[in-house]
Image: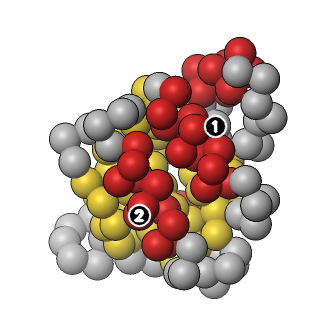
Amino acid sequence: MPLRSGAVMSRGDGPLEELPKFADGNAPEQLAPERARPEQLLYVDRMLRITCTVTPASSVIWLAGEIDATNSRAMLSILTQARRIDERLILDLGAVTFADISAIKALTAFTADHTLHVRNTPRQMARLMSLLSLPPFD
């Protein structure tokens, strides 16, 4: 489902901020304001932002923006470190707007042990994985 702005969540270090909502108007379970926890910034560059939200059920790592050869190694390093946050880790790719082959290779390596749940894989990323004969994340 496409995302649109609308769900509100506190960042802990500043004012309330707009976060994605599904096109049907429903916020993902982990974004519901009454269940939200402070969002922690794990990584940011001019194209990619990686944040983490810890909830009682699980921790969610949010990727937003573009992933390519310039930042895929840094992304993989941050995600590898993030595994220490929670054993019930969820990786949300819903706000990824572009991913090249280096991104797919890094994410495939990160998810190879199948110990985390990947959700909201963008259509273009799923198509690239299909063209490469890789199994889908979701």
Q: Which residue occupies the extreme top position in the image?
A: 131
Residue appearing at x 25%, y 54% in the figure:
44
Residue appearing at x 39%, y 49% in the figure:
73
**Vertical position of residue 82 compared to residue 99: above or below:** below
Residue 115, image x, y percentages: 76, 66
Q: Nearer the viewer, residue 98 or 7?
A: 98
Which numbered disc, 1 or 2, marks the residue that appears first in the sequence?
A: 2
Q: Nearer the viewer, residue 44 or 23?
A: 44
The quarter in which the C terminus is drawn is top right
**Amino acid at pointer 1:** Thr
Q: Nearer the viewer, residue 103 or 119?
A: 103
Mark 1 or mark 2: which is in front?
2
Q: Quadrant of residue 16?
A: bottom left
Q: Are marks 1 and 2 in contact (CB under 8 Å)?
A: no
**Amino acid at pointer 2:** Ile
The label number, if any, that marks residue 6 in the structure image = none
Packing grade of label 1 (10 A; few <14, some 14-19, many >=20) is some
| Labels in figure, total | 2
Q: Secondary structure at mark 1?
A: loop
Q: Secondary structure at mark 2?
A: helix
**Vertical position of residue 5 compared to residue 116: above or below:** above
- The image's colour scheme reads secondary structure
**Vertical position of residue 33 compared to residue 71: above or below:** below
Q: Quadrant of residue 67?
A: top left
The label number, if any, that marks residue 78 in the structure image = 2
Q: Is residue 116 left or right of residue 42?
A: right
Q: For residue 128, say whether it is visible.
A: yes
For the residues labelled 1 and 2, the Cα–Cα distance comes to 19 Å
The quarter in which the N terminus is drawn is top right
Residue appearing at x 57%, y 51% in the figure:
92
Q: What residue is disc 1 on?
A: 121
Residue appearing at x 45%, y 49% in the figure:
63
